Image (cartoon, rainbow, N blue to C red):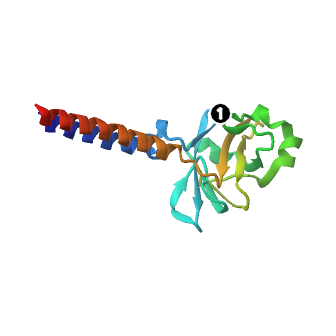
Amino acid sequence: MHMTRVLVCAALLSALAGNVQGHGGVSVEEDVCIMKLGDMRSHFTGYIPESRSTQEFCEDIPDTGNVIMVMDFMSDELRGMDVDFRIVRDVNKIGVTATWEDLGGPEAIEKASVYHLEPKKYPHGTLSARHRFDEAGMFIGIVTARDAEGQVRTSVFPFSVGRKTYWSYGVAMLLAVGVSVGLYRLATKGSAS
């Protein structure tokens, strides 16, 4: 009976450990790499070919250096729109809650820009951009799509570059220690009876 409890706890720990790791993209609705432009959606992926060639990123970029950013339009309407992509330094330290209104208007955005890909149509549904981040810091990505009638849809997404975050390791370690203590108590309680 006690061995059954130990095995059940081990199975639960293994299931939880899979959830602690980055976004798994289990379903499109849960995928944190989806950006919304009004009622339209695009999938964002970043790559650092020089230091982490096989890894994909969509929230924070862990290293400085050359980064390739790819947006795959999930909404076909985006293929016929003029789309531009801009990266601005988070000069006002807005952080993860940044919205379009927080950016201070066109002049402030232009002044804080570190990269701008001019508007154009992407009929195949894939926008690709390359930028070299020489310094670590907080940045804000801005994607703007304009349709033929002049209606504009915008997505603003803050991200960090070259900043190590260890909280997920801490959570995993605390979880492992907690389960280990629980398993030890179950095992010692079972041997005492």
Q: Secondary structure at mark 1?
A: loop
Q: Nearer the viewer, residue 92 or 168?
A: 168
Q: Nearer the viewer, residue 98 or 151?
A: 98
Report the side of 182 relative to 188 (left or right): right
Q: Residue furthest right?
A: 107
Give residue 25's quadrant in the image: top left
Inspect the image, locate mark 1, and give the three-letter code of the amino acid beneath it: Gly
Give residue 142's quadrant in the image: top right
| The C terminus lies in quadrant | top left
Q: Is residue 97 above or below residue 25?
A: above
User: Can I make out residue 26 in this image?
Assistant: no
Residue in the picture at 85% in, 37% down = 105
Residue in the picture at 78% in, 33% down = 102
User: Can I make out residue 47 in this image?
Assistant: yes
- Label 1 environment density (alpha carbons within 10 Å; few <14, some 14–19, many ≥20): few
| Residue 57: image location, x then y, percent | 56, 52
| Residue 97: image location, x then y, percent | 68, 33
Report the side of 181 relative to 83 (left or right): left
| The N terminus lies in quadrant | top left
Q: Residue furthest front?
A: 192
| Residue 131: image location, x then y, percent | 71, 60
Q: How many marks?
A: 1
Q: Which residue is mark 1?
A: 38
Report the side of 100 relative to 40 (left or right): right
Residue in the picture at 87% in, 48% down = 111
| Residue 87: image location, x then y, percent | 74, 50
